[in-house]
Image (spheres, grey):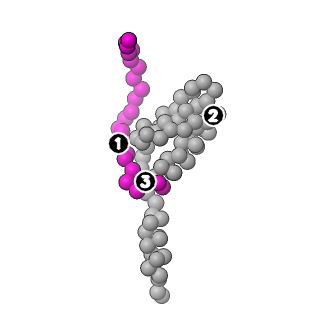
């Protein structure tokens, strides 16, 4: 059986990759905001689920458009409150 080289190249390009990411979600006014901590991408929605779903779509588009995306590895993220004084 002979396989076309163009088809083989297409199959190689379609190879799916998987990475672990960390997202934060919070309520801001009437909407929920979802921010990926590993990549500078965010989205929003009427519900937490909508915001996360919209973020997922935005991340997929980001990776489709960037052949060499910058991903920051974040281990054990935590929310830490602080007080900032400024003039």
Which portion, as a residue range, is magenta? 64-87
The residue that label 3 is drawn on is: 66
| 16 or 57: nearer the viewer | 57
In the image, residue 82 above or below residue 72: above
**Residue 50 shown in magenta:** no
Evaluate whether residue 22 shows in this view: no
Q: From the viewer's perspective, is 26 left or right of 5?
A: right
Q: Residues within 10 Å of mark 3 (few under 14, many from 20)?
A: few
Q: Residue at x 43, y 53 (%)?
A: 66
Q: From the viewer's perspective, is 14 left or right of 29?
A: left
The residue that label 1 is drawn on is: 73
Secondary structure at numbered mark 1: loop
Of the numbered discs 3 and 1, the one sitting upstream in the chain is 3
Secondary structure at numbered mark 2: loop
Q: Residues within 10 Å of mark 1 (few under 14, many from 20)?
A: few
Q: CA distance from mark 3 to mark 1?
A: 17 Å
| 12 or 61: nearer the viewer | 61
Q: Residue at x 43, y 69 (%)?
A: 12
In front: label 2 or label 3:
3
Percent across and percent down for residue 65 are 47, 54
Percent across and percent down for residue 14 are 47, 65
Q: From the viewer's perspective, is 32 left or right of 65?
A: right
Q: Quadrant of the C terminus?
A: top left
| 81 or 39: nearer the viewer | 39
Q: Residue at x 39, y 50 (%)?
A: 69
The residue that label 2 is drawn on is: 47
Percent across and percent down for residue 49 are 60, 38
């Amino acid at each position: 059986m002979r396989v076309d080289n163009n088809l083989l190249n297409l199959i190689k390009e379609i190879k799916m990759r998987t990475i672990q990411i960390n997202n934060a979600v919070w309520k801001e006014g009437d909407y929920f905001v979802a921010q990926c901590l590993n990549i500078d991408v965010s989205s929003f929605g009427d519900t937490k689920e909508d915001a996360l779903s919209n973020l997922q779509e935005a991340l997929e588009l980001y990776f489709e458009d960037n052949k060499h995306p910058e991903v920051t590895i974040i281990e054990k993220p935590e929310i830490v409150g602080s007080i900032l004084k400024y003039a």
